[in-house]
Image (cartoon, rainbow, N blue to C red):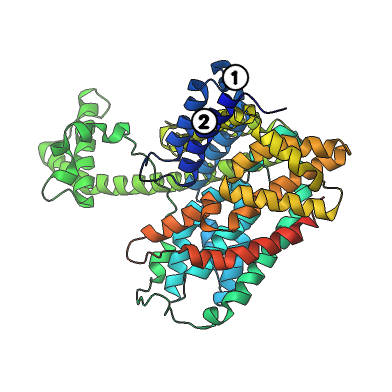
Amino acid sequence: MGMAGSYKVVLGSVAFVFFWVLAVFPAVPFLPVGRTAGSLLGAVLMVLFRVITPDEAYAAIDLPILGLLFGTMVVSAYLETADMFKYLGKLLSWKSKGAKDLLCRICLISAISSALFTNDTSCVILTEFVLKVARQHNLPPHPFLLALASSANIGSSATPIGNPQNLVIAIQSKISFWDFVMGILPAMFVGVLVNALVLLVMYWRLLSVQKDEEDGTSEVVGEDDVNSHRFMPATMSHLSSSNFEEFLDPLSSPSHINGSSTHVDAVRNRVNSVDEHEIQRAADGSIGSVRNSNASKEAASAIPSTEAFKVQNSEQKESKKGRWKNKSWKLCVYLVTIGLLVALLVGFNMSWTAITAALALVVLDFKDATPCLEKVSYSLLIFFCGMFITVEGFNKTGIPSTLWDFMEPYAKIDRVSGIAVLAIVILVLSNFASNVPTVLLLGGRVAASAAAMSASREKKAWLILAWVSTVAGNLSLLGSAANLIVCEQAHRVPHIGYTLSFWNHFKFGFPSTLIVTAIGLTLIR
């Protein structure tokens, strides 16, 4: 494909620049509208400038990718309600043998959870817990936060559901879930180990000192605070039927009444209601004939204590029943999740399998699904729609094709030098244009070039793209959304917040990314 007309090249480039600037720097002073709005702006400009037609814009939206992304987010939301991430967090501190052991655990658990539940989800859930554990043991937080973010990126490379760019690659390449995993899994495991080794070498002395002198803080978190930590991502408030009346009439709520009811008051109220029920049953003839008045008074005086015991016994039964239902629900969530993974490994359609698993959990929950559906990042889905259209418009200008025609002779994957050149191009583009747009721009061209050699080389080209574009996120703080999530989450923790600086990340991320990328490329199959 050659270059388009000059007006398309200029206007298409302008639209893409708007998208790129707002995607990489969402709070720029001249237009602080954020990534999602920036993505939509780029898409609309592509249509308004007539770089692509409205029909071409709609056709550019990849529905299978959106379906897979939506399904995995819903499943992750239900896993959170089943305390999956709480158990993962407890594994970090269980019988820990010191700072170095804790750092290695964070690397391993972060990598595995990201491969199964996406890197962004793992970072959202685990960041605050990791920071609390570090503060509890009076350790400098930043090696552990780096371990969490970098291992999440590396671990997410192993599966098509680990991160958004892998979703794109899996759908476009039509590589099966099993082949994808087997192709990258060895590189992922070795990459996590090498990444942990780099962290240990760089921060060995710092991790050997049991005192946090890094930022002069003396705030230490207690063990109870760590153990009671709840892994609840921020969501929209949900107005259930139980609190709707309280919303309409707040003065009628017990929490707004001075001297609110105690447990004893609740029992007494229930006893009174039971007494009224017994009286009604007597009127209906369900109770035998009335004794003499004295016996009746004695029986009446005995009712409250007897019924209080019945109420207490009933509450205990309800509590046991509730615990049993909670355990059954958790088991269902885990079984459905395992079924999802098995179905993906067998080779079922990935997007429809994920959606089916999500709806199975909605049905099994047997109540209003709004709270869990509100945890889905719809802004991310909209961002993807805008990005698909923007990238398609930029492709129509012919600029990506022309640049690839220039680079292709030097980026052949049938020789080591070609793989090195291709990896450098992907690393640079992933950090300047973000990894998902890089995959959309390069994927088809790299695969077509490799397919001219053989089908096996085409598959290897897709896997190289997945590996390098994912690990590239560790190069700088701005290279991956997971990095920014860890930085932002750690900064916002009350009283013990920590700011991970760009330099602290870069002086570790640059050497680690180059080493891990190079070693992983030798293991891609």
Of residues 23 and 334, the one nearer the viewer is 23
Mark 1 Cα within 10 Å, few/some/many (few <14, many 20+)?
some
Q: Is residue 46 left or right of residue 413?
A: left
Mark 2 Cα within 10 Å, few/some/many (few <14, many 20+)?
many
Looking at the image, which residue is at 56% across and 76% down? 203
Q: Is residue 514 above or below residue 197?
A: above
Looking at the image, which residue is at 52% across and 49% down? 481
Q: Amino acid at mark 2?
A: Gly
Q: Is residue 495 above or below residue 8?
A: below
Q: Earlier in the sequence, mark 2 or mark 1?
A: 1
Quadrant the N terminus occupies:
top right
Of residues 430 and 173, the one nearer the viewer is 430
Residue under label 1? 56
Looking at the image, which residue is at 36% across and 77% down? 216
Task: Tally the numbered discs.
Answer: 2
The secondary structure type at the circle numbered 2 is: helix
The secondary structure type at the circle numbered 1 is: helix
Question: Would you identify the image quadrant in which residue 440 lies?
Answer: top right
User: Looking at the picture, how far across and down is residue 325, in whole percent?
Assistant: 48, 42
Q: Is residue 307 left or right of residue 100?
A: left
Question: Would you identify the image quadrant in which residue 355 lies?
Answer: top right
- Asked whether residue 123 appears in the rendered view, the answer is yes
- Asked whether residue 180 appears in the rendered view, the answer is no
Q: Amino acid at mark 1?
A: Glu
Residue under label 2? 386
Please identify the residue farthest to the front as the structure is shown. Answer: 6
User: Looking at the picture, how far across and down is residue 30, in whole percent?
Assistant: 36, 42
User: Looking at the picture, how far across and down is residue 230, in whole percent?
Assistant: 42, 55
